[in-house]
Amino acid sequence: MLLIALGLLALPALQPSAHAATISDNFSRANGGLGANWTTVSGTTAPQIVNNTAQPGSAGAVNSAYWSANTFGSNQFAAASFPNSSGSNFGPGVAVRLSNSKGYFLWYGNSASTVSIWRMDSASSWTQLKASAKLTVAATDVWQLQAVGSTLTGYQNGKQVVTTTDTSYTTGAPGIWMYYATNQITNWSGGDVATTPTYSVGGTVSGLTGTVALQDNGGDNLSVAANGSFTFPTQLASGAAYAATVLTQPSGQTCAVSGGSGTVAAANVTSVAVTCTTNPPTTFSVGGTVSGLSGTVVLQDNGTDSLSVTANGAFTFATKLASGAAYAVTVLTQPSGQTCAVSGGTGTVAAANVTSVAVTCTTNPADDLLGRRGPCRDCPGPWCCKTTAQTACR
């Protein structure tokens, strides 16, 4: 077998791309060489036709050839059946971009009931790129290797079973690849892969100071950490819908998308605009409770932000303060006939609303019959006060 450590990979079922120009060879002709349409890969042995199948011309050596009667583009495929391959009967393979001892091939085996994608770097040097998971294999299976851009994909009866990427080779032709005496290939075909043009979706980000995560069509996530142009990883075909949204806002900012949805025309989309603005600082209210009030008291915070309170209960100043700001609650105007005192009225705003300011109002003592109030009520005689304000006895 071809010796290399094997990693197994389970893959989703996807359909191969449509094929453009296609050629085929079922090898249903006289035993002997493959014919003028085929060229043996340099440094390898020429495959032979035996009983209407392609087989190794010399077992235990690389037997490889490519179709040389046509010219192919970079995106190409090769497909065939391996009627004698099952279990541990390893090989053969179909190849793409094959020429001058270089190319890629999809090989049956190297581990029972698997296929793997290999890169051929010379007639004696091959590197396994990726192996499939174990498969249920039948002699009638159609195996296909497709190369589109840097993506190499293997299919079993149209179902994707292995894929990988490699950028080493971009030219060549479809072909076949064999090694063991038991290898047989029939119903071979190859050709160009018809690809649908795709276009990128993107635009510009402005005002960003952190990292914003964007999405297109609910997926295709893209993290953007700088102002300027951006492009989502996945391209879309003409006529496809796109919808760019913000998945995660940057810390301390809010980003809004304009021109984020539409239909892809036959050109890249560059008109999505993501505008980020810095959020205002988080602020907190200052307030508390009033008790004993029977009229209207006017309070202030920090010498401004006046608030008229006419009922007992909770109160809150209109102006909120940022965390770390100082507050100082005072009485600007006392209620008629009452005196209100503030406790817990000064401090520093933490990261929470201030609700601990207490304003306690008490009713002033009533005047006596002589018009004396406050401390003068206890003075002897009607003219015993020091001042007309009647604040103290003589």
Image: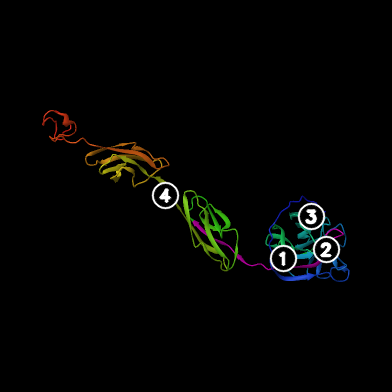
- Disc 3 and disc 2 in contact, CB within 8 angstroms: no
Q: Residues within 10 Å of mark 1 (few under 14, many from 20)?
A: many
Q: Nearer the viewer, mark 1 or mark 2?
A: 2
Tell me the residue that label 2 is attached to. Answer: 83
| Alpha-carbon span between mark 1 and mark 2 | 23 Å
Q: Residue at x 50, y 54 (%)?
A: 227
- Disc 2 and disc 4 in contact, CB within 8 angstroms: no
Q: Residue furthest front?
A: 369
- Disc 3 and disc 1 in contact, CB within 8 angstroms: no
SS class, disc 2: loop
Tell me the residue that label 1 is attached to. Answer: 76
State yes or no: residue 186 in magenta: yes
Q: Using residue 2 as the reference point, say whether residue 222 is left or right of it.
A: left
For the C terminus, which image quadrant?
top left
Is residue 234 in view from this perspective? yes
| Alpha-carbon span between mark 2 and mark 4 | 71 Å
Q: Using residue 289 as the reference point, say whether residue 13 is left or right of it.
A: right
Compare marks 4 and 3 and give the one earlier in the sequence. Answer: 3
SS class, disc 4: loop
Q: Percent from the top left, x then y, of residue 308? A: 28, 46
Q: Residues within 10 Å of mark 4 (few under 14, many from 20)?
A: few
Amino acid type at image mark 3: Ser
Q: Nearer the viewer, mark 3 or mark 2?
A: 2
| Alpha-carbon span between mark 1 and mark 4 | 56 Å
Q: Nearer the viewer, residue 240 or 268?
A: 240
Q: Residues within 10 Å of mark 2 (few under 14, many from 20)?
A: some
Report the coloring of the rendering: rainbow
Amino acid type at image mark 1: Gln
Tell me the residue that label 4 is attached to. Answer: 280
Tell me the residue that label 3 is attached to. Answer: 125
Amino acid type at image mark 4: Pro
